[in-house]
Amino acid sequence: MTADVIDTPSPNHDARPPGQRVELLVLHYTGMPTGAAALERLCDPASKVSAHWLVEEDGRVFRLVPEDRRAWHAGVSRWHGAADVNGRSIGVEIVNPGHEFGYRAFPEKQMAAVERLCRGIVARHGLGPADVVAHADVAPTRKEDPGELFDWPRLARAGVGLWPPVDDGASAPTAPEALAMLAAIGYDLSDPRAAVVAFQRRFRPARLDGVVDEQTARRIAAVLTAS
């Protein structure tokens, strides 16, 4: 990412914890009526929110916070039992009105830009596929983004995130076994149903009921094996 980047500094950031390396890439949608409104909020000191990057629907990429600083994008969140997701992650906001304002598919120009941007981030920080998560993954009781219409398989084909094959003929773990696997993947199980919905939203978007049926259990097992 060089000439295509639009520098739009946000004041909303601080230092990462001493010695903390970047361990996660967190993908969001903006969830506001327009990209301009989202960009304004992410750069407003009164909002106390930000992200490192924002990607518009037309493919424009905005750099808001230097990657060596802690942006304020994940809020109250947890992954692998650890809080302060902000302190150990890069946050990318993807313009989309979200479920509140007319959730829609992500355009090709936007997805191409997201793919390029994320490939650079994972390369710079040595992140593996299991280190790329949705905002809903790390905050399942509060967040839905980037949601069930986001093209995770495309990113996985580009080496960004997981989308493992699933053997639908294999024996499925029991529901308790699958929940234990979900925790091993990294999900916070303080609300098990919310964690299952977050997983389904990403890996089984046709079903968002929070029920650990056989197909959901098989997918949980496949993701854990690939992690």
Image (cartoon, rainbow, N blue to C red):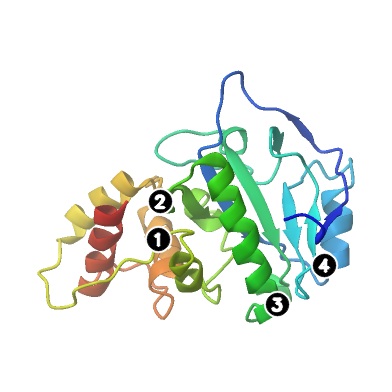
Q: Can you tell which of label 3 and label 1 is closer to the viewer?
A: 3
Neighbour class for label 4 at 10 Å: few (<14), some, many (≥20)? many
Q: Which mark is residue 172?
A: none
Q: Residue 150 placed where, x, y %?
A: 55, 72
Nearest the eye: 29 or 89: 89
Kindly state the secondary structure of the residue where label 1 is placed. loop
Quarter placement of the N terminus = bottom right
Nearest the eye: 214 or 106: 106
**Is there any visible trace of residue 140 in the rendered image?**
no
Mark 3 lies on residue: 109
Q: Residue 31 placed where, x, y %?
A: 71, 65
| Dot placed on the residue nearer the N-terminal end, 4 or 3 | 4
| Dot placed on the residue nearer the N-terminal end, 4 or 1 | 4
| Dot placed on the residue nearer the N-terminal end, 4 or 2 | 4
Q: Are marks 3 and 2 in contact (CB under 8 Å)?
A: no
- Work out how far the residue at label 4 is from the one at label 2, CA to CA, in angstroms: 28 Å
Mark 4 lies on residue: 35
Neighbour class for label 3 at 10 Å: few (<14), some, many (≥20)? some
- Work out how far the residue at label 4 is from the one at label 3, CA to CA, in angstroms: 15 Å
Q: Residue 16 placed where, x, y %?
A: 65, 27
Q: Are marks 4 and 1 in contact (CB under 8 Å)?
A: no
- Work out how far the residue at label 3 is from the one at label 2, CA to CA, in angstroms: 25 Å
* Amino acid type, residue under disc 1 in the picture: Leu
Mark 2 lies on residue: 130
* Amino acid type, residue under disc 4 in the picture: Gly
Mark 1 lies on residue: 162
- Work out how far the residue at label 4 is from the one at label 1, CA to CA, in angstroms: 27 Å
Kindly state the secondary structure of the residue where label 2 is placed. helix
**Is there any visible trace of residue 34 in the rendered image?**
yes
| Dot placed on the residue nearer the N-terminal end, 3 or 1 | 3
Kindly state the secondary structure of the residue where label 3 is placed. helix
Judge whether 10 appears above or below 141 on screen. Answer: above
